[in-house]
Every structure is written in C-alpha cells, then in structure tokens.
Amino acid sequence: MNHNKLAIQLKAVIIGVAVFGLMVYLWIVPMLGKSIAAMAPEFSHAFIPWLAFLWATGIPCYAALFFAWKIAANIGADHSFCRENGTLMHRIARLAAADGIFFFLGNLVLLFASINHPGIVIVSIFVTCIAMGIFVAASALSHLIMEAADLQEQSDLTI
C-alpha cells in the first residue's frame, strides 16, 4: 500500500469518527438527556449542566482528531517517521489523559453538586481507564515514532 492511499484511508476514518462524534454529542446525548428528564422529572434541573459537561469532554477529542489529520497528511507526503508525527502523537496522548481526568473529576464535581449518581461515578472510572489506555498506547507510539525518526536521520546521513 502506498503512502498516499494509506493517508486517504486514515483521513476517511478520521472524518467518520468526527461525524459519528457529532451525532453522539449533538443528537444522541441531548435526546437521552431529555428522555431521562421526562422519565424522572426530579433530574430535569441537571440536564443543562450535564449537557455542557459532556460537550466539554468533546473538545479534546476533536483536537486529537485534528492532530491525527496532520499525521495522516504527513504520511501522505511520505513523512511517516518524522519528529513532527512523534510530537503530534504525544499531544494526542496528553489530550487523552487530560480528557480522562477531566471526565472523572467532572463526575465527582457533579456528584458533590447533587446532580450525579454514585453509579455513574463508578462507570466514569472505567471510562477514565480507557482514556489512560489510549494515553499509554499513544505515548508508546510517540516514542517509537521518535526512535524511527532518529534512525531515519542516521540513515539519511550515511553515504
């Protein structure tokens, strides 16, 4: 598979994830929130804070998609193993960690504000673990890309 074809496929996946994320954040989450508020009117006051909180968790996700797009563009330009891709992957790792921590702490804040349930906080621990797994995987990839970039530079300097 050539670099350009791979880059196009990666960009298609990134667009798909972005569109699916928009559907979740702008359609499914508000619809579920309204149905929960209709079934349990005592939680209707929590709809707007929860919606704002969940939308805020999407910001790092879309920033990571932006960085992934730049990585795909570099791959298409035949710069797969470059320092820029390593740096971008490291930024994606930090965004995953920050979003996971924000999600967990936000759930705690909402719990102490009496608009969250302890069961949801327990579920947020699992979501945070997934985010930390993404952090570890992206950090490892970043490290490997940086090492490959070093080897590439050494190879380019060899006659």
Image (cartoon, rainbow, N blue to C red):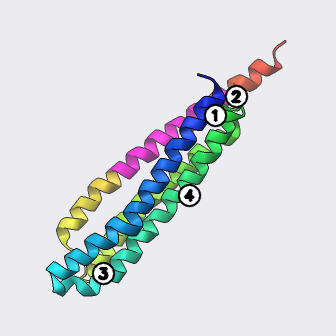
C-alpha distance separating marks 3 and 2: 50 Å
Q: Tell me if residue 68 comes above or below residue 110 in the rendering.
A: above
Which circle's residue, 3 or 2, is located before the other in the chain?
Answer: 3
Task: Name the image quarter holding the C terminus.
Answer: top right
- Taking the spot 52% from the left edge, 49% from the top edge, the residue there is 15
- Which type of secondary structure does the marked residue at label 2 adopt? helix
Which residues make up the magenta segment? Answer: 130-149
Instruction: Check disc 2 and report the residue beneath it.
Output: 150
Q: Nearer the viewer, mark 2 or mark 4?
A: 4
Q: Nearer the viewer, mark 3 or mark 2?
A: 3
> Of the numbered discs in the image, which one, if any, rests on residue 63?
4
Quadrant position of residue 85: top right
Q: Residues within 10 Å of mark 3 (few under 14, many from 20)?
A: some
State the residue at coordinates (69%, 42%): 84
User: In this view, which residue lies farthest toward the left?
Assistant: 39
Kindly check if marks 3 and 2 are in contact, taking CB atoms under 8 A apart as contact.
Answer: no
Residue in the picture at 23% in, 60% down: 123
Q: Is residue 50 magenta?
A: no
The answer for how far apart the CA atoms under marks 2 and 1 are is: 6 Å
First along the sequence among labels 2 and 4: 4
Q: Amino acid at mark 3?
A: Phe
Q: Amino acid at mark 4?
A: Ala
User: What number is the disc on residue 146?
Assistant: 1
Query: Residue 5 vs residue 95: left or right?
Result: right
For residue 47, the mark is 3
- Quadrant location of the N terminus? top right
The three-letter code of the residue at mark 2 reads Asp
**Residue 65 horizontal side relative to residue 100, left or right:** right
Marks 4 and 1: which is nearer the front?
Answer: 4
